[in-house]
Amino acid sequence: MEELNYGATAWMLTSASLVLLMTPGLALFYGGMTRSKSVLNMMMMSFGAMGVIGVIYVLWGWSMSYGADVGGIFGNPFDQFGLVGTIYDESGEFIIDGFGVPAIVGVAFQVTFAIITTALISGAIADRTKFSSWMVFVALWVTLSYFPMAHMVWGGGLLSGDGPFAGIAAPIDFAGGTVVHINAGVAGLVLALIIGKRKGFGTDPMRPHNLPLVMLGAALLWFGWFGFNAGSAFTADGTAGLAWVNTTSATAAAMLGWLLTERIKYGKGTSLGAASGVVAGLVAITPAAGALNPVTSIALGAIAGVLCALAVGLKHKLGYDDSLDVVGVHLVGGLVGTVLIGVFATDGGLIFGGGFNQLAVQIIIAVVAIVFSGVITAVIGLAIKATMGWRVPEEDEVRGIDLAEHAETAYEEINS
């Protein structure tokens, strides 16, 4: 029996709490970016995800992520249904993992990842989506896309060090480039295409209604992300410290890269750009936080800041309505971070003499994640469109989705 490590346990409980805080932080970030008539609905989509997944994860989410393997794709949902066999051993003592942390603390940590990943998708479909349809989607998507992806990457499945691609090089996803950001980014793109554009997209101004709220949300996301990345070391050690420093370095560089891009393109750097650059850097360093050094983390962050700043404009060129730039920030940032591990990883990276193997594997796992999330999301999205429907009536969209869906408004006077 493993001996309880109080320091590691305290760190993991703290990390779980930090990651849980990220979802209310995301609600503020997204809420500020919407129009004033949509802010409550936008925030409720994040809170709704917390409610649904907080229940589902205990029932079958943990088991599907980390239970007995089924074909390398997902864990058996009945293996540890309701956390049976996860909390106590046969003698009635708490099960302790290899880091000296009770297994139930691992459950606490992992449920917060499932919640924030699913909530990220909501930004792509703001201003026009039925809350009831969103809640059904949350339950289906987290079950059919997130849990399997978590199993494939972290639970010993297809995309893990035990999978078929490990013969080339062990895939690296320290804290969720594929599981979280590519997964959510692809889902956001697919839903935006299925649901269609907001009324007035491309012609009416749809500016953020509260930029201080956006910046506050970004600050809370940055704070919570230390639980996300440094917590993924699973104990309080040097790897956690390295992940903390790499996260800060990359995020700072990404913010500067985004602002510089804005300065060159538009003549000014904006507060929205600074906040978005912060998130882009956090996204990009997530899969790489334990594999890079602080200097290469700066390079990764700067590249992500520039590329994501350019990518957010693709929706206008290509004609899809990704309301709050989930594709430009999370999909592109997740791809940058996941793929460039193959270039910048201290152990096996191209510039450190590791050859092309790691880069090849990182590209493979990114492509698999794109295809898997895209197919699953399309099936779920089209099924909901054919049954419940996704969109609120046009008059409700124009009048304000907050009032239509929740019988409330954020402000006494509603301005678009």
Image (spheres, rainbow, N blue to C red):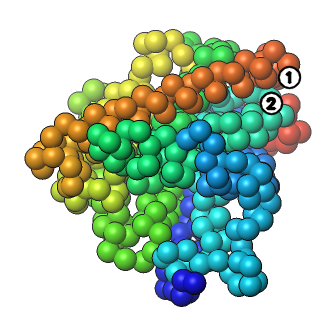
Q: Element at badge 1?
A: loop
Label whose residue precedes the other's in the sequence (1 or 2): 2
Picture residue at 70% right of the left edge, 68% below the top: 86
In the rendered image, is residue 403 in sight?
Answer: no
**Helix, strand or loop under label 2:** helix
In the displayed structure, would residue 159 be above or below residue 53? above
**Residue 150: image location, x then y, percent:** 56, 47
Labelled pair 1, 2 in contact (Cβ < 8 Å): yes
Q: Find disc 1 in the rendering and name its residue.
A: 388
Task: Count numbered badges in the picture.
Answer: 2
Spatial CA span between label 1 and label 2: 7 Å
Q: Is residue 8 visible?
A: yes
Q: Position of residue 377 (x, y in %)?
A: 64, 27
Residue 104, placed above or below residue 203: below
According to the picture, the residue beneath numbered tag 2 turns out to be 133
Residue at image x 29%, y 40%? 168
**Residue 314 in picture, x, y percent from top left:** 42, 19
Q: Residues within 10 Å of mark 2 (few under 14, many from 20)?
A: some
Specify whether 317 is left or right of 125. left
What residue is rendered at 63% in x and 36% in y? 145
Name which residue type carries label 1: Met
Label 1: how many residues lie within 10 Å, few (<14), some (14-19) or many (20+)? few
> Between residues 142 and 124, which one lies in front from this camera angle?
142
Image quadrant in which you'd find residue 72 = top right
Left or right: 85, with 108 as reference point: right
Most distant residue in the right direction: 407
